[in-house]
Amino acid sequence: MSKTKKIKSPTQMELVEPTFAALVKLGGSATVDEICEKVIELLELPDEIVDEPHRGNASQQTELEYQLAWARTRLKNYGAITNSKRGVWMITTDFADKTSVSRSAISEHIKKSRRAEKSKAESDILPENNDSSSGSGDIPEELEPWRTSLAEILHSMNPYAFERLAMLLLRECGFSQVRVTKKSGDGGIDGTGKLRINGIFSFNVAFQCKRYTGSVSAGDIRDFRGSLTTDIEKGVFITTGTFTRAAREEASNAGKQQIDLVDGEEFIDKLIEYRLGVTEKMIYTVDRGFFEKV
């Protein structure tokens, strides 16, 4: 009886071309989630690859999300794409008329960059599929050490402290009348609130916040949807973990009440946006070229 060969997740260098192609297909700009979904579609990746967790850090990313973060950084350093502070990625003007990029050209660019920074003895060792980081300035924004540290803190928080943090964040996001209706033993909470839009429209919202280190399944989404009462107009599921592809498909299932999803990375993004538990510091660098020209 033959053994089934395990399918390997694509590496960062195998993803640079599909990532650029995804942005082209999406009109030149897209969010991280949109890029990920388009790459999955273009490569026809199976669920076992899409949902495979990355075990190298505490951010609770999937392996695919981790490798895509590096792929975007490679493309950014190559000058093909850039990103805004709001997390939207876009093709640069220099590549606006391009429909594809060359993986080998990007690999060569990485080699040249390293040779410029290091001695020749250290620089001529980068294989085309090298997936390791290459210095602090080359780390994808999603993988910065402080984000990993923040993810670890969230996962280790007392459930009641996490509940207070989740409620505070919801209020900062514009929710009012936030009430906890149920506490669960896994650090998750269920509750309700009102979300007012532009001071005119308001919606009754039910939410679930799950302090979780794994992936939320489609069954979890169905259970949450099944608990919603008729007066609830919107459901929001927040987790410090990730959502499986099946869970995302279930949340947006046509004909059923739509559920908005916020995963661990997006939760951290919101903490940053509202400056909850994080402080931005200015770092000065010395411009040696300036002094040489004086």
Image (cartoon, grey):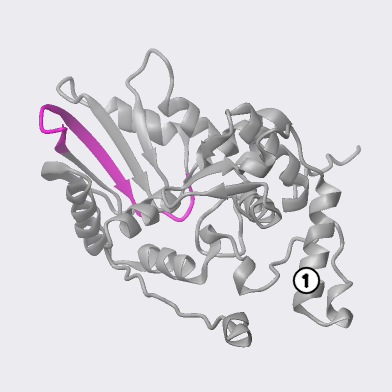
178 vs 274, left or right, is: left
x and y percentages locating residue 191 in the rendered image: 19, 41
Residue bounds of the magenta highlight: 193-215
230 vs 102, left or right, is: left
Q: Which residue in the structure is indicated by mark 1?
A: 114
Residue 54 seen from this side:
yes
Residue name at image x 88 percent, y 79 percent: 120
x and y percentages locating residue 236 in the rendered image: 30, 36
Residue name at image x 76 percent, y 36 percent: 100
Specify whether residue 204 is painted magenta: yes
Quadrant placement of the N terminus: top right
Residue nearer the viewer, 248 or 79: 79
Specify whether residue 133 is painted magenta: no
Dot 1 alpha-carbon crowd within 10 angstroms: few under 14, some 14 to 19, many 20 or more? some
Q: Name the kind of residue labelled 1 in the image.
A: Arg
x and y percentages locating residue 235 in the rendered image: 28, 31
Quadrant placement of the C terminus: bottom right
SS at badge 1: helix
Residue name at image x 23 percent, y 53 percent: 169
> Is 153 above or below relative to 70?
below
Residue nearer the viewer, 225 or 142: 142
